[in-house]
Structure formats: structure tokens, C-alpha cells
Image (cartoon, rainbow, N blue to C red):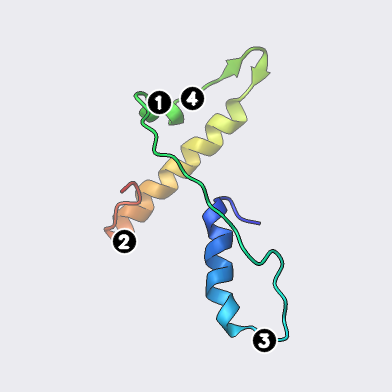
Amino acid sequence: MSVLPWDDLQFWYTVSPLLSPKVKVIPMTAHLKVMAVSFDDLHKIRAPVGICEGLDLRLYDEMIEVSDCVLVNLTKVTGDSVFE
């Protein structure tokens, strides 16, 4: 199981030629339907939420903050922007 739907498709595309002809892969086909969208406030997705509707999301806020630090450090090490 992957986070993004196309990761599973990429896995099967890569592995299929390596399998024996006797191996039957189920499902045999897949359709990926996509739609282009535009978000005006997407930059706010990483903004801390805190407590919303009585639900404490501070732990989630901390995870997002840590992941941001990891991405920034990865960009510094590799020189490649992970945001492009």
C-alpha cells in the first residue's frame, strides 16, 4: 500500500517484466483518473491548526513542523528543491 495512488501503478509497471509468465497478477488493469485543480490558499496547508471544533490537532501540527524541517534540510544537502 502506498501513499499516492500512482506509486502502486509504478511498482507493478516496474515489476511485471520480472515475473514468470506463470504468475497471474490481479488486478490485471487499472485506470487512473485525474483532474487539474487550482488552489488559491494552498500555502496555508502547513499552517498550524491547534484546536479546531474541540479536536486537539497540536500533535499533527508538530509532525508537519518536523517534516518541513526535514524537507528544508534535504534541499540543502541535495541542492534539489523538493517543492518543484
- The residue sitting at 55% across, 38% down in the picture is 63
Quarter the N terminus occupies? bottom right
Tag nearer the camera, 4 or 3: 3
Neighbor class of circle 3 (other Cα within 10 Å; few <14, some 14-19, many 20+) is few
Q: Which mark is residue 78?
A: 2
At horizontal 53% and vertical 74% (from top left) the residue drawn is 14
Contact between marks 1 and 4 (CB within 8 A): the answer is no
Under circle 2, the secondary element is helix
Of labels 3 and 1, the one closer to you: 3
Disc number for residue 44: 1
- Amino acid type assigned to the residue bearing label 1 in the image: Lys
**Residue position for label 3:** 21
Return the disc, 2 or 4, that comes first in the chain's sequence.
Answer: 4
Cα–Cα span, label 2 and label 1: 26 Å
Give the alpha-carbon distance from disc 1 to disc 4, as whole Å. Answer: 9 Å
Within 10 angstroms of label 1, few (less than 14), some, or many (20 or more) residues? Answer: few
